[in-house]
Structures are given as structure tokens and as C-alpha cells.
Image (tube, rainbow, N blue to C red):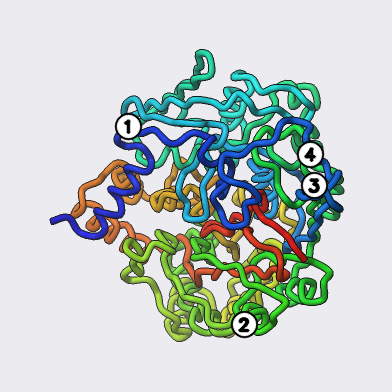
Amino acid sequence: MKSKIFAILLILALVFGLAACNTTSTGDTAGPGGGSEPGSSSAPGSSAAPGSSGGGSGGASGGAPVEITVAFNALPNGLDPISEDLLVNMVISNDIYDRLIFRDSEMNMIPGVAKTWTQLDGVTWEFEIDMDLVFHNGDPITMEDVEYSILRLKDIPKSADVGNVIESVSYEGSTLTIKFTEVNNILLARLIAQFILVSKSHIEAGGDDAIYLNPLGTGPYRIAEFIPGTTLVMETWDGYPHQKPQIDRITYMAIAENATRYIAVETGQAHYAALITALERDMAESDSNLAVVSSPSFRNIHVSFNNEMGPTTNVNIRRALTHALDRDSMCALLGGRPPVKSLLFGGYPDLYIDPPGLPEFDLDKARELLEAEGYGPNNPLQLELIYSPVVDPSIELYQSHLASIGVDVTLTQLEFSVYLDREGAGEFDLMFTSGTNRGGHPFTDLDRFDNTMIGSRNICRFSHDRAQEIVERLRVSLDDQEIKTLILELNTILGEEVPNVGIYLQPLYSVAARGLEGVVLRPDQQQCFRFATFNP
């Protein structure tokens, strides 16, 4: 009798079309969250004729425009979610652009640019494209735009690992065919996480600025005002051929501190504060004017060591630094977040295991390992820990424990684009960072340890021959016992080698003003306002 783990993977296999499958058409559900999500302003499948409404000209009922302000921890410097994958950028892109296939609040695949999809064989997929979509400048989409949107992934470092496994893209009429280079259970999941529909002519005419500063999509919202890192406003677009959002205008603001974001909603400065902590959640639950939006989480907070250059190429140094990580205290400091040790399958309880042999918090053992490598009070190990704009007191707690064992760590907070540049180039000793499963398939987590993805998904730059063999086999296996055996072996290697170390899964809570409903918050942190309603 098949075990629970195999049942889960078999379901995932079917969802991803490992047996040839078709989905419903866009007439049944449209866009991220779908017309059936709570808060949709009309029945699933309804559509509005181009030019009938929108552009901030009036609310859904014909009255004053409906407007909200949304607070995130930062605003992007550019609006290409592929090259600059700041969370808020990914969120904004879901309303500006259409994706090949969207995911709903439970990570199920639903129609996007593709109305239906079918797997023809182990490496070939066929998609029927929604040719009713129109770019914000009035140009109808073409199959050449769809093809270009896929092939451009090869030229962007953050998505090249996806682009490079695409052997060919072709089309006939409105039917698109994609052929991958290998049989792999998760390639479609990785593609749909990266794809956005862009205009080939718009990008070729305007260069980088065309997508960084002046995005042209087919989604229900378009950019009304954008000052990089400072101001971002989007409004509904008259020409959207499907269901028009009820909220006409969304202003995004940046507030780094969780508590201050919460206060902004409490005082009416904002209507939605993204990703607050449990402390603010508890306060919101006791306030009749506020509502909590929550979701299970795939997002892990962790420390990544540079496995390719510098002192942290020494496994004993990595183990010493891990012995100095007081995970329990760090989680308690942040209101009791769920600890996590492995970066594999966090949020998937039937697949997750703690890595055997991973160093536990023990400062004496940390000192012993450092002394064996020649470091001590008279010769302290000097390292730099980089992190992106995030306010997390557990970083300083880790620094203090490292100082107690004679490790001098400089904390360097970087603007996000600079952080990404240094991450991609491997210019760091340690990183305090986060990762989330954006593919919607648990095995996309394997990318973090794939040596062909160093500098993109594999940010710790880990390379291990046996681990690579396991990663490649897990992507194609559906054998229950083999999967369990390989997961244990891979986690054992990670516990011994410690390329990175998990700290906690970040609970996903946002707070909304009472009357704002239907915002979709997914386990991968994505948030969508397409089908939200606001009735103050």
C-alpha cells in the first residue's frame, strides 16, 4: 500500500500534468486567485468590454473611485520581477502582467495566458493561448510576444537556469509548444514561476528602461506613477478584457519596520500592511477595525555560507559558525516562530526532516573547532555578514554569539539591488537571507543545492558530487521508498557539510483595514489584489 508521501507526490505529479492533462478555460476562472476567490466582484467568467470602465474613472458601482494604500517593507528600484525579485516587485507584477499559468491561494494551477495546457510526452507541453489579451498601449498580443517572453529567460541571470532547459519554443495559430531538454517533474513549475507576458516591440524599442521603469503588460492594472524606491501607484486599465478589479487605484508605500506598518493601518494611513509578525497579528485580532490575512508558509529564514571562496570554504569553520547559532532564542525573540533546520521542504511536513549531524547550539564546541583551525583570541576570524533591508533583531543576537567565541563579524545592510549583485557574484562570507518555494512543487527546493545553478538558485555556491546525483534523481523519481531514502541521504550530507543553515519559517500574516476583503496571500508570500474588494 502506498504511503502518504507517495500519495502527495502522485497528486503533485497529476497536477503538473505528468499524465497528460487539460485544465478549464479562462471562462471558468481568470488570473491569480481566480474569479472564484473570496471578494471577487462578479461571477467567475464575467468580462468587461475594452474601454467600458477602469483607469480610476469610477468605482465598480459607478461612484467615486475605490482607492487603497498598501504598505510593504520596501519599494523596488525597477519593475522587472525576473531580474529584480524583491517580494513587492513580484506582487506588483501579478497585477500588471499576466503569467502563462497562475496559481490560486492553495497553489493550484489555474489559467492565465494559457487557457489550457497538455503534456504530449515526457519533455513536450502544448498550450492554447488566450489571444483576447491586449497590452496597455492597445496593441493586441501576438504569438511572437509569447515566444519572446519565454526565450528572454535565457538572457537574465536570475532565470537562466529555467531558460537553459528549454530546447525549443514554437507555435501554430494560437497553439504554443515548448520542448524541454530533459524529463523532469518540476520544469513546468519553474517556468510558470518565472514567465511574465511582455511586449517584444516595447522592450526592443525602449531597452532596459522599457521594463524597469515603464512596464507594459496585459494585466488589469497599469503603472500610473513610479519613482524608483520611493513612489509607486497603479490604476485599473480600461482595456482589460476579463473581470475588472473593484479597487481602482492602489498606492504602495515603503515602511521597513513591522510595527510601524501595522500602526499605519491602525491609524488609517494605509489599508493593508504586508507580512507583519505574530505580535501585530495578536493586536489586530483584538481590534474590531482590523482583519488578519494569513497563510501557511514556505518561506525560510536562514544563514548561507560561501562554499566557494573565503574562510567559509572550510567545513570546520562552517560547523563552528553553526554551533554559534542559537535557533531557539532567535525564534523566541521574534514571538515564537517555528524553527527549521533544513532548507528542503519547509512547509511540507510530510517531506521535511531535520538534517542528521547538523551542529546544535554549543559555544564550547564552536571554540574548539575554531582553535583547531588556528583561530582564537589572538587571531580572531574576521567575517562580513550581508543582509538586505530587513529589520530582524535576531541578526544581532547571532553576531553577539559569534563575538563570544572570538569571531569578529561586520554586519552590512545593503540596498536590495546591491545585495542581489553581491549574492550573484559570490561576494560575501555569510548572508542572512530568506528563501521561498516559488515553484509550487516541493522539489523546486532542490535547486538550492544544484551545482548547475550556482549564482542563481544555489546562492551558497554548494557543489557536491553525490548531492548532485541525489538532486537529479529526486526530480524524476516517483518511487516511494527511493524518495524517502534519497531525502534522508541528502539531508545527511547537508548536516555534515552545512552549506547553509535554517533558522525559522516565517509565519505569513498581513493586516487589513476592516472592509478590505478578498486579498489572496499564498504560502510563497505572493499577494494579489485583482479580486479584492474595499467597502469602508
Name the image quarter holding residue 259: bottom right
Q: Is residue 113 left or right of residue 246?
A: left
Query: Looking at the image, which is closer to me, 222 or 411?
Result: 222
- Amino acid type, mark 3: Met
* Residue in the image at 60% along x and 70% along y: 509
Q: Give the CA distance from mark 2 to mark 4.
A: 39 Å
- Amino acid type, mark 4: Ser
* Residue topped by disc 4: 53
- Amino acid type, mark 1: Ala
Q: Earlier in the sequence, mark 1 or mark 4?
A: 1
Mark 2 or mark 4, whichever is nearer to me:
4
Q: Is residue 283 above or below residue 372?
A: below
Kindly state the secondary structure of the residue where label 2 is placed: helix
* Residue topped by disc 1: 20
Using the image, tell me which numbered label, if any, was put on residue 234: 3
Q: Is residue 488 left or right of residue 68?
A: left
Name the image quarter holding residue 117: top left
- Crowd rating for badge 1 (residues with CA inside 10 Å; few <14, some 14–19, many 20+): some
Using the image, tell me which numbered label, if any, was put on residue 383: none
Query: Looking at the image, which is closer to me, 481 or 523?
Result: 523
Kindly state the secondary structure of the residue where label 4 is placed: loop
Kindly state the secondary structure of the residue where label 3 is placed: strand
Q: Is residue 329 left or right of residue 64?
A: left
Q: Give the CA distance from mark 2 to mark 1.
A: 46 Å
Q: Give the CA distance from mark 1 to mark 3.
A: 39 Å
